[in-house]
Image (spheres, rainbow, N blue to C red):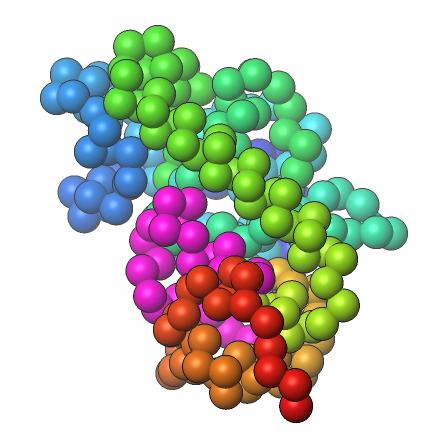
Amino acid sequence: MATTSRRSGSVLRDRARPPSEQELALIPWMPSLKDNERERVVGDLLVGDVEAGDFICRVGRPVTYWFGLIDGLLKMSNDDAHSPITFTGVAPGGWFGEGTVLKHEQYRYNILALRKSVVAGLPVASFDWLVEHSLGFNRFVMHQLNERLGQFIAAREIDRIASPDLRVARNLAALFHPLLSPGVGHMLRITQQELAYLVGLSRQRVNEALSTLQAEGWIRVEYGGLRVLDLQALRSGTLRPR
């Protein structure tokens, strides 16, 4: 997969367009806004089309937008070439980096597009205005931060799991998170290679793990993606001896 050195936020500056009504309907925090709040910020939202290998955020770059994924698949990772760590994947409907935006600090992670994707961005000034004026928006952000904390605690636990099959299961559970990835539902469009990038295993080993999880009845592999059958089992289940 090719990579680029695009600056943080450049995908929106270089390819910016207003969101369509259909894209606005896919933004999960919009329903939390009152009519006047929505009118105040909807004109500030930008949408950009990115290619596989484009960076949306880069370590050390100043925060410019609060980003969300309308369609596609992203990877959040560190910037260490000798010891790379994938923190999480970002699936459709996911918005990320609210902690960085709240603190107005530099990014401490990279966000990379694993496939052609559609990314939305709300400028920092608009985010700040909503924090100051919208109770509904504040509730949404608080829930995001709380769930994100739980997600990263779970990620540390996943790193200690010896079973590749369970590592794949736990990573899939994170991608199907109903609050952090509300656009996924029960079906996730993802290839085995993309999942391998997120989990840190070979594509062949991921294929074996998916076969095991399907045999357990936790997922079903379908054309173009995966369907979750038992989300709770993906999160905390144990595998039968084989």
Residue 232 is a magenta residue: no
Residue at the (34%, 34%) spot, across then down: 46
Residue at the (34%, 29%) spot, across then down: 140
Residue at the (60%, 77%) spot, across then down: 239
Q: Residue furthest left?
A: 35
Apparent side of residue 221 relative to residue 105 in the rendered image (left or right): left
Residue 193 is a magenta residue: yes
Q: Foreground residue, 33 or 80?
A: 33
Q: Residue furthest right?
A: 82
Q: Position of residue 29 (x, y in %)?
A: 29, 34
The part of the image, by quadrant, that contains residue 63 is: top right
Numbered range of the magenta stretch: 170-197
Apparent side of residue 126 relative to residue 52 in the rendered image (left or right): left
Q: Position of residue 11 (x, y in %)?
A: 48, 40
Q: Foreground residue, 205 or 60?
A: 205
Q: Vertically, is 163 above or below 92?
A: below
